[in-house]
Image (cartoon, rainbow, N blue to C red):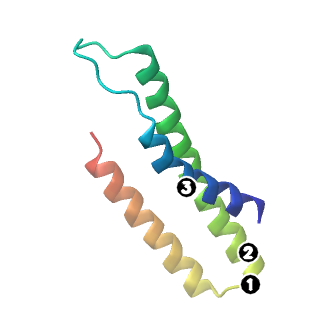
Amino acid sequence: MVIGIIVTFIAVFQPINAFFRPKKGKNPTISQRRMVWNLIHRWSGRVGIVLGIVNIAVGMHYGDVGFELIALTWAVVGVIAIWHFSNSR
């Protein structure tokens, strides 16, 4: 349950975090504030994704679901991961 609350908090925090993103300056180099913001934004998203996957696994374990649903869930997670990494920069 705690993992789900943390994942929900991160999911709500991400758009709020985007609202406070420092503006790009006229200078082509990135400001220190924006660099810190980028790190927080990226890593909180990554942590949210990993904790979300862990939450799925824990929920399936305690929910005592059948093998077919477990296999389908991990197949979907795998397809999303492959799609994400094939489309990343």
Q: Secondary structure at mark 3?
A: helix
> Hey, what amino acid is under mark 2?
His
Measure the C-alpha gap from mark 3 to mark 2. 26 Å
| Picture quadrant where residue 22 is located | top left
Q: Secondary structure at mark 2?
A: helix
* Residue at mark 2: 61
Is 47 left, or right, of 62 in this rendering?
left
Badge 2, how many Cα within 10 Å: few under 14, some, many 20+? few
Residue plotted at (55% across, 55% down): 12
> N-terminal of the two: label 3 or label 1?
3
Q: Secondary structure at mark 1?
A: loop
Q: Amino acid at mark 1?
A: Asp
Disc 3: which residue: 12
Viewer-nearest residue: 64 or 10? 10
Distance, label 3 to label 1, CA atoms, is: 29 Å
Q: Earlier in the sequence, mark 3 or mark 2?
A: 3
Return the x and y of residue 89 as percentages of the image width and height: 27, 39
Give me the residue at 24% from left, 11% from top.
Answer: 27
Residue located 47% across and 38% down the image: 42
| Tags 2 and 1 touching, CB below 8 Å | yes
Distance, label 2 to label 1, CA atoms, is 5 Å
Q: Residues within 10 Å of mark 1 (few under 14, many from 20)?
A: few
User: Which quarter of the picture shows residue 83?
Assistant: bottom left
Q: Which image quadrant is residue 21 in?
A: top left
- Between label 3 and label 2, give the one nearer the viewer: 3
Compared to 18, does 38 lie above or below?
A: above
Give the numbered dot on residue 35: none
Q: Which mark, by number, is residue 64?
A: 1
